[in-house]
Image: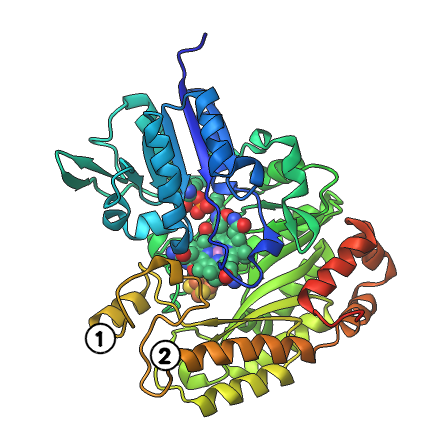
């Protein structure tokens, strides 16, 4: 028998209508694995990924029955997960566990999160040390970063300091069940994720990264990054660096890439990045290509310089065009997001013109979203101050695909219509084979073979192309 606290950490599922692509991208629950790594000496831990049918609500009950958790911690990063998270919380409470929530949504609206009866505590911000302290002390009073209920009232303890990333343990990937391998994938290609930095120096109006991380940007040491990379299963050849803005600091990118090249680590990498940085520092992307970076997510948001300025994006249309060309010449695949109705005064004509420009640009995987005021963003404050919310708050709708804001010239139906039109017309316009010819030309045959034909094989490659370009091979 052990007297250690029994802790269940749960990655919450998304609502079925979450998005067009979410089922094709399932990354491991890295945040929970960081938490587990930092309480392993104090607790018996189970991580249940509720996105797997093996850990659906019915099966979670059985798991709780067997494990008798003292604490159930649920990760709520996406606002639209909160109702499902509450369903898990209710089951956990029935088993007598203390229920806590953490993650981006819970941090942004702790009061709202605690308004549901089954949740006892919210850990705001990074969970590593607050959770550890909670297990040690057994009570939330005096632990920074915790909001909790006491005598019918909600108490918010002061914010915690940011973690020294290099003093925390690397993520504990060993809590994954064997069958997890079949689920963690990026469009059919097995994938793992890792983190080299936290935070972003920019302040885009619709984003809350800077607020979550108190306007600070921190990196992990190269020693820790390589140690972490070496932990990733040999058979997984695709790694997503989930950093908010991986290319924010050139010196960091140079160090990471040189370390990968020097150690001859043969994996393909995906990361976030910004097109203005591509244009200003193309040599950084050249180095990234050498280190095996193949796929990048960029925020394009709008093609109007005026709108980009109002979003505080610090990006211009000419940088968008030039950045895409530079990345393609280096053999990168680009996923770029465009916000429809990024400006409150947009008209149908503006949306038509956005779609035409999107077609003219060679974005390999264009994604489209509607302007969504997530809590803890400047946009959230503005929309609330101006009374621009369409109706009462329904967190289900906060998935970038639902109209949330009132526009003077666009109805919710117009926005939905253009969102569907964008996916239908712009995706079908692209020719996937050109992309692969381009990569072959830029990266050479050996890179092409090792990256595309050995990772999950040709089947994965075809699956990948068909999911992104539905007309392929029809
Ligand atoms: C990877 C990622 C994705 C992946 C999927 C995620 C997955 N798990 O499979 C993809 C690319 C699919 C994705 C998509 C989207 N994403 Co996203 N994504 C992220 C990202 C960059 C990293 C998540 C991560 O792994 N973090 C690293 C780990 C180490 O940290 P963590 O999970 O946050 O955990 C820490 C703390 O939060 C806390 N914590 C977390 N859970 C718990 C639980 C407990 C009990 C405790 C105590 C603590 C705790 O402690 C952890 C350790 O410090 C975050 C931003 C970010 N920096 O986290 C956005 C983020 C989660 N995404 C966001 C959004 C909005 C989206 C999109 C809707 C649009 C978009 N921006 O692309 C889409 C949804 C898909 C769609 N098209 O509809 C928002 C969510 C905002 C909100 N309130 O809902 C975030 C916060 C980014 C942002 N600021 O805009 N995303
Ligand atoms: S959208 Fe990207 S660049 Fe802008 S603040 Fe957020 S993480 Fe930084």
Residue at left offset 77%, top offset 49%: 455
Residue 470 in view: yes
Outermost residue toward the front? Answer: 58
Q: Is residue 121 above or below residue 199?
A: above
Residue 341 in view: no
Pointer 2: what residue?
A: 310
Residue at left offset 28%, top offset 40%: 145
Disc 1 under 8 Å from ligand 1? The reply is no
Q: Residue 49's x, y, as percent? A: 52, 39
Residue nearer the viewer, 294 or 110? 110
Q: Earlier in the sequence, mark 1 or mark 2?
A: 2
Query: Tag on residue 386?
Result: 1
Q: Residue 63's x, y, as percent? A: 49, 27
Q: Is residue 3 above or below residue 154?
A: above
Q: Is residue 390 left or right of residue 324?
A: left
- Mark 2, secondary structure of its residue: helix
Q: Is residue 228 above or below residue 132?
A: below
Q: How many marks?
A: 2
């Amino acid at each position: 028998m052990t007297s250690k606290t029994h802790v269940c950490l749960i990655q919450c599922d998304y609502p079925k209508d979450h998005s067009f692509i979410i089922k094709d991208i399932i990354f491991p629950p890295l945040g929970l694995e960081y938490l587990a790594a930092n309480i392993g000496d104090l607790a018996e831990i189970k991580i249940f990924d509720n996105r797997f049918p093996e850990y659906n609500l019915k099966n979670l009950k059985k798991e709780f029955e067997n494990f008798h958790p003292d604490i159930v911690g649920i990760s709520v990063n996406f606002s639209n997960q909160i109702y499902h998270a509450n369903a898990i919380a209710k089951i956990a409470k029935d088993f007598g566990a203390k229920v806590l929530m953490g993650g981006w949504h819970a941090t942004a609206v702790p009061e709202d999160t605690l308004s549901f009866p089954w949740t006892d505590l919210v850990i705001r911000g990074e969970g590593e040390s607050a959770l550890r302290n909670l297990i040690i002390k057994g009570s939330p009073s005096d632990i920074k970063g915790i909001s909790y209920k006491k005598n019918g009232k909600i108490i918010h303890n002061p914010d915690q300091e940011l973690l020294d990333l290099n003093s925390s343990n690397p993520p504990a990937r060993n809590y994954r069940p064997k069958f997890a391998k079949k689920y963690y994938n990026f469009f059919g290609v097995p994938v793992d994720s890792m983190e080299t930095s936290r935070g972003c120096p920019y302040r885009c109006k619709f984003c809350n990264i800077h607020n979550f991380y108190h306007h600070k940007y921190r990196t992990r040491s190269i020693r820790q990054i390589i140690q972490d990379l070496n932990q990733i299963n040999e058979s997984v050849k695709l790694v997503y660096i989930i950093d908010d803005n991986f290319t924010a600091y050139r010196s960091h990118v140079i160090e990471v890439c040189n370390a990968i090249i020097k150690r001859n680590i043969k994996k393909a990498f995906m990361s976030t990045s910004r097109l203005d940085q591509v244009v200003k520092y193309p040599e950084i992307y050249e180095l990234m290509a050498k280190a095996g970076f193949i796929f990048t997510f960029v925020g394009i948001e709008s093609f109007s310089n005026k709108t980009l300025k109002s979003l505080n994006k610090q990006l211009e249309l000419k940088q968008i065009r030039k950045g895409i060309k530079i990345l393609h010449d280096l053999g990168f695949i680009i996923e770029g997001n465009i916000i429809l109705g990024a400006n409150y005064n947009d008209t149908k004509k503006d949306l038509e013109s956005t779609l035409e420009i999107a077609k003219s640009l060679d974005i390999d995987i264009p994604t489209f979203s509607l302007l969504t005021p997530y809590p803890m963003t400047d946009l959230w404050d503005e929309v609330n101050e101006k009374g621009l919310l369409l109706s009462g708050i329904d967190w289900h709708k906060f998935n970038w695909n639902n109209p949330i804001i009132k526009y003077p010239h666009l109805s919710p139906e117009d926005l939905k219509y253009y969102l569907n039109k964008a996916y239908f017309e712009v995706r079908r316009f692209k020719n996937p084979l050109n992309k692969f010819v381009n990569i072959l030309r830029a990266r050479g045959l050996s890179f092409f073979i090792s990256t595309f034909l050995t990772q999950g094989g040709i089947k994965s490659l075809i699956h990948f192309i068909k999911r992104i370009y539905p007309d392929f091979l029809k």
